Image (cartoon, rainbow, N blue to C red):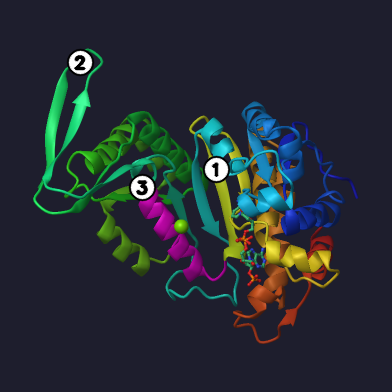
Amino acid sequence: MKKVKMDIPLVEMDGDEMTRIMWKMIKELLLEPYVELNTEYYDLGLQNRDKTDDKVTVEAAEAIKKYGVGVKCATITPNAARVKEYNLKNMWKSPNGTIRSILDGTVFRTPIIVKGIEPLVSNWKKPITVARHAYGDVYRDVEYKVEEPGKVELVFTSVDGKETRKLVHEFKNPGVVLGMHNIDKSIESFAHSCFSYALDLRQDLWFATKDTISKIYDHRFKDIFQEIYDKEYKDKFEAAGIEYFYTLIDDAIARVVKSGGGIIWACKNYDGDVMSDMVATAFGSLAMMTSVLVSPEGYYEYEAAHGTVQRHYYKHLKGEETSTNSMATIFAWSGALKKRGELDGNKDLIEFAEKLEKASIETIEQGTMTKDLALISKNENINSVNTRTFLEAIKAKLDQMI
Ligand code: NAP
Ligand code: MG
């Protein structure tokens, strides 16, 4: 059998704990036997981030700009306990945050749907992708606790010193207040990422805010989306047979719940934080959620939505058997390989990635799955297997297909 060739590399970012173990197994069992893997490797494991003073994370993000596509393993975001555990020089920032700030992207999260794992919302037949704006609003707010009578004002001071004031509230009794912001450029990037991703997936794009109440702030989001859509995407959407639909956030929630899925739902920062957890839970399992960062310039970074599965890793270290679900990590790889194939016109690579996804889904649908899914599956004959056996079962299926 001839291996599939890759002319241009993709950026491979290794990570931590149980997902690092699975990363190696996926390459060994499901990728390297079939593809002449051409990757530029960056070790984002915590030890190497510490060793390189986290420069490796920045280099990896720059490499994604160079090659256009990256695939990332889950990584530890250190807290005080991790600083002690790994004897770190510094409490390094979240690699995802660092990469996102360099690529300026939007994160799209999509569940992997398999028969037997039924969504809690029974009419959801196709996946719902949540796109979350990842800048500003309440995540960069300034808050204040009012303890005594007095007034709170918004004051804008222009560079030449001119002041504009707006009364927020005249406090007679104690209370609380917050100030928050967003910037047009970030909202524009968000809009471009959403429109181009909708074209990529050929799915309708929904966007919602509370512009009837927030007549300037939320209305700005609505206007920017509409202006960009009319100017740059309307014709392309019509040609692709898809729709851009704007509504109020409460109406959107009612419609999403009643829908059959198969849409991309663009959310402001807070809405996306809350709704992505709701959608993930309702679709069954965090281990079945994929995630892709799409930059407005068209760079793509694929990963699993879950973390490094620390609890399973400690079991693994003790020599105990684990049953960790590798689906989201496999789909991060297949997503990246498909995108590489699309960008390079490499049909064989696209075809391989599609077969890999099909083999993975069929393995679960025919009853072989990890414990997290075995617990919720409606399948009649369930074969609950360990981490490696699950990958071997996918490999057996893939071998039949190729
Ligand atoms: P986690 O890795 O997402 O795992 C939380 C729990 O969810 C696991 O203990 C497990 O439940 C279940 N789970 C998650 N993924 C699974 C999978 N693939 N297969 C089976 N079960 C799965 O979150 P965490 O343990 O709270 O965080 C560990 C580390 O991950 C942290 O250091 C955090 O910084 C990092 N993190 C990284 C990313 C990223 O790189 N994108 C995202 C989130 C968190 P049971 O224990 O009940 O089996
Ligand atoms: Mg959340």
- Give the CA separation, mark 2 to mark 1: 40 Å
Q: Is residue 392 above or below residue 92?
A: below
For the point 26% across and 60% down, the residue is 250
SS for callout 2: loop
Please tell me in which quadrant of the rendered image residue 163 appears. top left
Residue 143 lies left or right of residue 242; in this view the side is left
**Residue type of the residue flagged with mark 2:** Gly
SS for callout 3: loop
- Give the CA separation, mark 3 to mark 1: 16 Å
**Residue type of the residue flagged with mark 3:** Lys
Return the residue found at the far bottom: 380
- Front-most of 348 and 224? 224
Q: Identify the residue under disc 2.
A: 161
Q: Is residue 250 above or below residue 211?
A: below
For the point 17% across and 42% down, the residue is 215
> Can you see residue 173?
yes
| Number of the label disc, if any, that sits on residue 55 | none
Q: Earlier in the sequence, mark 3 or mark 2?
A: 2
- Front-most of 162 and 213? 162
Q: Identify the residue under disc 1.
A: 293
For the point 60% across and 77% down, the residue is 116
Circle nearer the viewer, 3 or 2: 2
Q: Identify the residue under disc 3.
A: 268
> Can you see residue 14?
no
Return the residue found at the far right: 1
Q: In the image, residue 244 lies at what x, y percent?
A: 34, 46
Q: Residues within 10 Å of mark 2 (few under 14, many from 20)?
A: few
Residue 344 lies left or right of residue 143; in this view the side is right
Q: Residues within 10 Å of mark 1 (few under 14, many from 20)?
A: many
Q: In the image, residue 181 lies at what x, y percent?
A: 31, 37
